[in-house]
Image (cartoon, grey):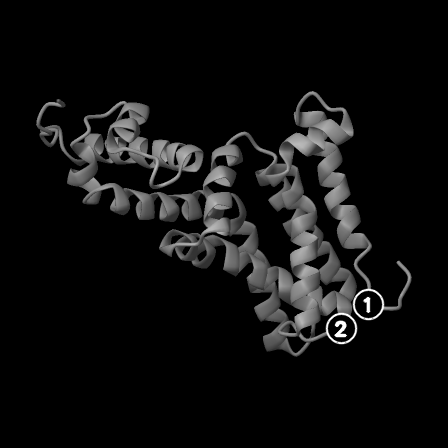
Amino acid sequence: MSKPFKPDPRGTERGEATRQKLLTAAIDVFGRTGFDGTTTRALATAAGVNQQAIPYYFGGKEGLYLAAAEHLAGRITSHVGQLRQQLQGRLIEAERSGKPLSPAEARELLAQLVQTMAAVLVSTESEAWARFLIREQMEPTEAFQRVYGGAMRPTLMVARRLVAVVLGDDPDSEHVRLRTLSLVGGVMVFRVAHAAVLAQMDWPEIGPPQAEKISAMARELVATLTKPGVAS
């Protein structure tokens, strides 16, 4: 039996460190064994903290699960958020000035976004994220809504607006939505189908040389984005 948990007398700094350990461990453990298959003991052990820290800081396993989803959204945003805000700002500026983005500029901005996404997806850090998210994709819970609303939807919305400019179409049209998802899926495959990618490419791993090739491929995908019936 674990010892009763006592808040650290040294204050909030140590408490925040404990929370961060639990959040990081939770993304990995929940991703590996799922919500039902995960115990608070396993979570505490993985985080290297007292088991009673879970109800103290998160109210229980479910609270930690939802907090882990929000933490994951925050981690994704830490990688793509700054660029996303810059692109949003440029879109707003173009709209207010009455001088719409040219397809060429939209394509360049879109390439930057897709390349940034590709870099995140092939990073070691995203491995645990993918396991967590794939489970939520298969059987969505409130956790999916928190990740989607906090990180995925805002990025997809910016991508859609840029795709729409490139195609000369309405960003809310079904066609633009599908083209955007197809484009994003073209780089997501390097994480969600990691083993198949290595086998198909005869790569031992996705290290810096491979990541550079994937980045170039991401830009190429954007370059081939054309209106229906128009050759690339």
Residue 11 drawn at (x, y percent): 14, 33
Q: Quadrant of residue 16?
A: top left
Q: Quadrant of residue 24?
A: top left
Q: Residue furthest front?
A: 37
Kindly identify which residue carries mark 2.
Answer: 168
Q: Residue furthest bottom?
A: 98
Label 1: how many Cα within 10 Å (few below 14, some 14–19, many 20+): few
Front-lying residue, 135 or 108: 135
At a point 73% along the width and 45% down the height, the residue shown is 218
User: Looking at the picture, does residue 142 appear above or below residue 40?
Assistant: below
Screen quadrant of the N terminus = top left
Between marks 2 and 1 in the image, the one whose residue lies nearer the viewer: 1
User: Looking at the picture, does residue 144 appear above or below residue 227?
Assistant: above
The answer, for residue 101, to whether it is visible in the render is no
Kindly identify which residue carries mark 1.
Answer: 227
Q: Is residue 27 left or right of residue 41?
A: right
State the separation of the CA atoms marked 2 and 1. Answer: 8 Å
Label 2: how many Cα within 10 Å (few below 14, some 14–19, many 20+): some
The answer, for residue 195, to whether it is visible in the render is yes
Q: Are marks 2 and 1 in contact (CB under 8 Å)?
A: yes
Residue type, mark 1 in image: Lys
Residue 203 drawn at (x, y percent): 73, 24
